Amino acid sequence: MKMLKKAPLAVVIGATLLPALAMANMHGGHSIGPSEGDREFSLSGTGKSSKDFDNGSAGVIGDYGWYLSDRTLVGLRQSVNYASVENGDDVWNGSTSVFADYHFGQGAARPFVGASLGGIYGDGVNDTGIAGLEAGLKYYVLPSTFVQARAEYQFLFDDGDSAENNFDDGAWAYTIGMGLNF
């Protein structure tokens, strides 16, 4: 009788692992992580705060990129954000940017560093340039599927002079999500 009670649990676990095993077998022994020429898509949740943590936002961010080598990724990033502003109206905004990341290591854990450059637009912001330096970690749970965490220090600018002047007034942006290489 105890065996019958445990059987549904075994079926559920087996059904959960079956897609993962199928994906792993599709790679036919392919090593973990991307190869030169692979594409990558990731979807993450994002949040950011002022350096004093008195204003904040949350949103969704998608990345689509191409591996120039097994370590260098370049791509396009799009975000849509909702912001809660202290003593002001709540707002919606977005940003579109290009990015480049360099990944370290060959195992399941792949730390990376990079930079991005683009524009921000929407309610409550001046349509302007945005730049950032970033660092993060991707962890491959399957040969081509990963979870990731990233932190980016972003600052706004209208021209080269304002970029230099505004660096100290930047904000941190954080993302947690998952993605895949194909």
Image (tube, rainbow, N blue to C red):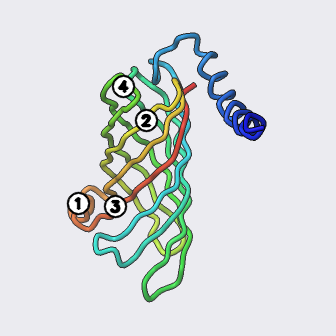
Of labels 1 and 2, the one closer to you: 2
At label 1, the amino acid type is Asp
Residue tagged 1 = 161
Location of residue 87 with respect to 168 vertically, above or below = below
Question: Residue 35: percent from the left, percent from the top?
Answer: 46, 18
Which label number is shown at residue 172? 3
Q: Disc 2 or 3, which lies upstream in sequence? A: 2
Alpha carbon of mark 4 to alpha carbon of mark 3: how far? 25 Å
Of labels 4 and 2, the one closer to you: 2
At label 4, the amino acid type is Arg
Question: Residue 52: percent from the left, percent from the top?
Answer: 29, 75
Q: Is residue 14 visible?
A: yes
Residue tagged 2 = 139
The residue at the point 32 percent across, 40 percent down is: 114
At label 3, the amino acid type is Trp
Question: Residue 64: percent from the left, percent from the top?
Answer: 54, 37
Alpha carbon of mark 2 to alpha carbon of mark 3: how far? 22 Å
